[in-house]
Amino acid sequence: MVEEGKLASDPDHLDDLTILRLTQEIKDVEASKNPLVGDFKPISVLLSEYKDATFRNKIKALGGGNAGYRPVRGDGNCAWRAFAFRYFELLSKLSKEEIEATSNGLQARTSLLDEAGYSDTGYIDFVEETFNLFQKLPDMTPEQVVTEFNNAEVSSAIIVHFRLLAAAYIKTHADDYIPFIDQGEGADIGEYCNRNIEAFSVEADHLALSALVNSMITVDLGVVYMDRSAGDEAVVHKFSPVESSAEGRPPSLKIDLLYRPGHYDIFYK
Amino acid sequence: MDSQNTAPAAFSSHKMQDAPAAMIDSHSVTKRLQSELMQLMMSNVPGISAFPISDSNLCQWTGTISGPEGTYYEGLTYKISMTFPPNYPYHAPVIRFVSPMWHPNVDMSGNICLDILKEKWSAVYNVQTILLSLQSLLGEPNNASPLNAQAADLWDGNPAEYKKLMMTHYKDIDEINDQ
C-alpha cells in the first residue's frame, strides 16, 4: 500500500480508484460499529433511550413481555432490509413445504418485472440471490438468517429484487398510484419509481411500502409510528395486499416495523 | 494509512467487531464486471466501446463514445474513464471524460453531471446503459443545470459559435492515446 500512501498524502491528486477505496474504508469502519441487521433487544432498551414523556408512554404501550426490536443499519435501505430480513426470519421457522410454496408464489411474481419492462439480464442476478436463500432456508436457523443478512452481497441483492418488485407493481398498476404521485416538475410514474424506489439507498416512503406488500401478496405489514404526535399510543399504519394468495397458501406472514422519523427497525410483538 | 491504524482501537471493545464484514467482497464485483464485458462485446453496439485497462484490475475501464448523428458531436469520438467501486453495482461507478469535452454538463476536468450516475443510480444499470445515456447526453444536454454555462447559453443561442468553440477543445482520440 506504499504507492497509495503517496497518493493519499496529496489530496489534490487522488485518483478515482483511491477516492472510492478511501470512501469504502470509512464506510467499513462505520459498518463494523453498526451491523446491517443487529441483535434483538427487549423493549426496555428502547425505553432507556428516551426521557421524553410522549415517547416513554408510547413505548410502554407497545407492550412488555416478549416485545422488542431489532436495529437495522440506517443506510437508506433500512425499511427494505428490515422487511426482507423479517420475511426470511419468519419463513425460517416454517415447514419445508410452506417455504417452498412461498418461494413458488414469489417466483410467479417475477412476471411483474417482465410486464413492467425490466430486462431479465438486468434483474436476474438479484432475483437469483433471493431464491438461493430460499433453497438454503429449510436447513437454516433464524440466527443463520441474521448472519446471511449481514453479508451485504446477499442482502443488497435481495433488496434490489424487492425494490424492483415494488416498482414493477406501481408501473403495472399505474392507475391506482398516479393520484398519489406528486406530478410537479413533470414527474411521472417511471420517474417516480426510478428516483424513489429503484435507486439504491433511497428510503422507502408510504407508496413504496404499499407497492411492496401488493407485489409480495403473502405479507401483511404494520408500521408502528414512534413520533412526537399527540396520544399515549403509537399510531400503527397497516398495509395489506389487494390480492390474496390462492387457497390460503402460501401462508400469510405478519411483519411489523418500528418507525422513528427517518429510520425503520424491526418490531417484535 | 492512518485510518487503518487508528480505526480498530475506536471500537475494539465492541462485540460487533466479530460480525461478518459488511463490505461486498471484490470477487462478486469481478464476476459481475466480467459478465458485463462479455455482454458488451457480444452486443457490439455501434458508437460505444469499453474494456478494462488491464487484466489485473477489472475495476478500471477505459471507453469511447462517438457523437450521435445530427448533433454537434457527429463524427467525433471521445475517450472516457470508468472506475468501479468495491460495492458496484449497488453504487455508481465514477465516470469522467478523458478527452477534453466542451459540453453543458461536463466540466473542464471531465466531471459529468448526469442524474443516473448520482441520485438516480440503480443497480439494474450497467456499463452499456451508462454509455448509451452518455451518448444521448451529447445530443440532449440538461441546459437547466449546466456545469459549463457558456456551452449551455450557446447550445440554442448560437450554433455556429457553439460548434467553433467545441472544436477548439476537441482532441483526436489517437492524440489522447499517445499521451
Image (cartoon, helix red, strand yellow):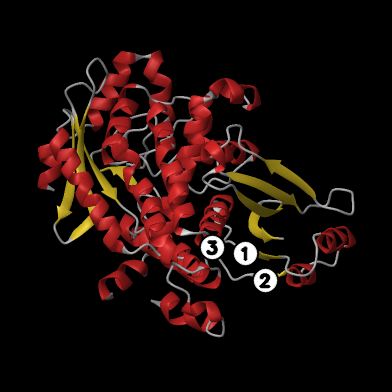
Q: Amino acid at mark 3?
A: Lys
Calculate the distance from the C-alpha at mark 3 to the C-alpha at mark 2: 20 Å
Residue A92 locus on image (x, y percent) = 50, 61
Residue B27 locus on image (x, y percent) = 27, 62
Which quarter of the rendering shows the C terminus of chain A? Answer: bottom right
Residue occupying the point 68% across, 59% down = A267
Residue density around tag 1, few if under 14, some if 14–19, many if 20 or more, within 10 Å: many
Residue density around tag 2, few if under 14, some if 14–19, many if 20 or more, within 10 Å: some
Q: Secondary structure at mark 1?
A: loop
Residue A194 locus on image (x, y percent) = 48, 34
Return the chain for callout 1.
A
| Res B171 → quadrant | top left
Nearer to us: label 3 or label 1: 3
Q: Which mark is residue A93?
A: 3
Q: Is residue A16 left or right of residue A156?
A: left
Residue density around tag 3, few if under 14, some if 14–19, many if 20 or more, within 10 Å: some
* Residue A218 visible to an observer of this rendering: yes
| Res B173 → quadrant | top left
Residue occupying the point 54% across, 64% down = A37
Q: Are marks 3 and 2 on the same chain?
A: yes
Q: Is residue B135 above or below residue A240?
A: above
Counting residues from the start of the chain, the first of labels 2 and 1 encountered is 2
Residue position for label 2 = A41
Q: Which mark is residue A10?
A: none
Counting residues from the start of the chain, the first of labels 3 and 1 encountered is 1
- Asked whether disc 2 touches disc 1, contact meaning CB atoms under 8 Å apart, the reply is yes
Q: Are marks 3 and 1 on the same chain?
A: yes
